[in-house]
């Protein structure tokens, strides 16, 4: 089960392509008690072998109880994966303290805001021994040359680390890609090849952490089965599932900064399963959803089990 949990809409970045829901700051933070009660409810409901808690914001690491929540999840749901989507802006000292309780740390690198790659390199090197850490670069078409420069720098500085480009929407959640040129679109494919090659390079820093459950994504056409990634599905334009059955609501839920619980991150926004901040009981779906959308643009939603109509 995948829990896509937006803890807040509080953020210390001001990316122009982000939406107000992710950085408006209207909802603040939940209480620690509200958050831990939700973890209890999820564990009690889920019959899955394990759960992945994808904690994001806003910027989740700004919450004073964030480290304590990670520790609670680890104790209450010991087989779980704790994954954090962050801009990585906290100090190296902060990451030294809290990275050991996180299984996966995904740093979203925003070139215009960060300015250089120095801090993200320091954070990755700090987290690498105790967690699985990766970097995704938001490819802003307005500073494309600088994005390429940062990508090359990170590849050179971080052997063995997943460094991947991420297509940007004109506004987060819009489903409309930035107006990339043909040459820029071509670069994505080459960059993914470089990214895969970099994973085979040896990192000189020794690993210390226990590897958690793998979350591999597999696709099949009924004859051939292959391992893939949500980024490759999007870049290859294979993210179209209209009419398919989808296990959102069962194999994943999305928790918004307001406390509303929905069956997916970017679709079926009209379906409210309850609000944990208001103490509402969660209404769990009993049947798969039938996709009604032209395209699926959220990585978490893409990874949910789907079946084409027979």
Image: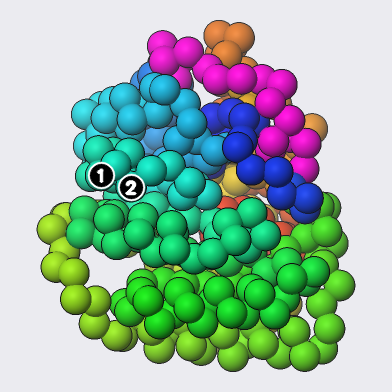
Residue 92 is labelled as 2
Mark 1 is surrounded, within 10 Å at the Cα level, by few (under 14), some (14 to 19) or many (20 or more) other residues, namely few
Residue at 29% over, 42% down: 93
User: Where does label 1 land, which residue?
Assistant: 96
User: Which label belongs to residue 156?
Assistant: none
Q: Choose between 16 and 281: the one closer to the eye.
A: 16
Q: Name the quarter where the N terminus is drawn.
A: top left
Tell me which segment is drawn in magenta: 19-35
SS at mark 1 in the image: helix
Taking the spot 41% from the left edge, 15% from the top edge, the residue there is 32
Residue 261 at x, y = what percent?
62, 28
Q: Is residue 289 magenta?
A: no
Q: Residue at x 42, y 22 (%)?
A: 64
In this orientation, which residue lies closer to the viewer: 286 or 166?
166
Image position of 304 with respect to 262: above or below: below
Residue 114: quadrant of the picture: bottom right
Residue 249: % across, % down: 59, 39
* Residue 63 to residue 51: above or below: above
Q: Is residue 258 left or right of residue 175?
A: left
Residue 73 shown left or right of residue 135 in the figure:
left
Residue at (84% x, 83% y) in the render:
181
For mark 2, give the secondary structure. Answer: helix
* Residue at mark 2 to residue at mark 1: CA–CA distance: 6 Å
Across and down, in percent, residue 158 comes to 36, 74
Quadrant where the image shows the C terminus:
bottom right
Query: From the viewer's perspective, is residue 279 above or below residue 144?
Result: above
Question: Are the residues tagged 2 and 1 within 8 Å (C-beta)?
Answer: yes
Q: Position of residue 103 (x, y in %)?
A: 30, 50
């Amino acid at each position: 089960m995948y829990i896509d949990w937006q803890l807040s809409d509080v953020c210390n970045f001001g990316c122009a392509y982000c939406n107000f829901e992710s950085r408006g700051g209207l909802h603040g933070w939940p209480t620690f008690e509200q958050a831990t009660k939700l973890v209890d409810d999820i564990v009690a409901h889920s019959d899955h072998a394990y759960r992945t808690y994808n904690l994001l914001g806003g910027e989740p690491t700004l919450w004073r109880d964030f480290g304590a929540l990670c520790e609670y999840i680890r104790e209450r749901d010991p087989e779980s994966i704790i994954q954090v989507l962050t801009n990585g802006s906290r100090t190296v000292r902060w990451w030294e303290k809290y990275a050991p309780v996180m299984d996966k740390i995904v740093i979203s690198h925003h070139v215009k805001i960060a300015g250089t790659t120095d801090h993200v390199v320091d954070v990755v090197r700090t987290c690498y021994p105790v967690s699985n850490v990766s970097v995704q670069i938001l490819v802003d078409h307005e500073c494309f040359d600088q994005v390429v420069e940062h990508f090359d720098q990170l590849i050179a500085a971080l052997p063995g680390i997943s460094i991947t480009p991420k297509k940007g929407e004109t506004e987060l959640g819009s489903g409309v890609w930035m107006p990339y040129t043909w040459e820029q679109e071509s670069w994505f494919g080459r960059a993914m090849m470089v990214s895969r090659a970099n994973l085979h390079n040896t990192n000189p820093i020794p690993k210390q952490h226990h590897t958690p459950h793998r979350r591999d994504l597999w696709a099949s056409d009924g004859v051939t089965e292959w391992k893939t990634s949500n980024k490759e599905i999007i870049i290859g334009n294979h993210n179209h599932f209209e009419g398919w059955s989808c296990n959102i609501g069962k194999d994943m839920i999305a928790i918004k900064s307001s406390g509303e619980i929905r069956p997916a991150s970017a679709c079926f926004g009209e379906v409210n399963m309850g609000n944990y901040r208001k103490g509402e009981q969660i209404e769990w779906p009993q049947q798969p959803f039938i996709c009604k959308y032209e395209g699926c643009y959220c990585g978490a939603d893409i990874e949910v089990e789907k079946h084409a109509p027979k």
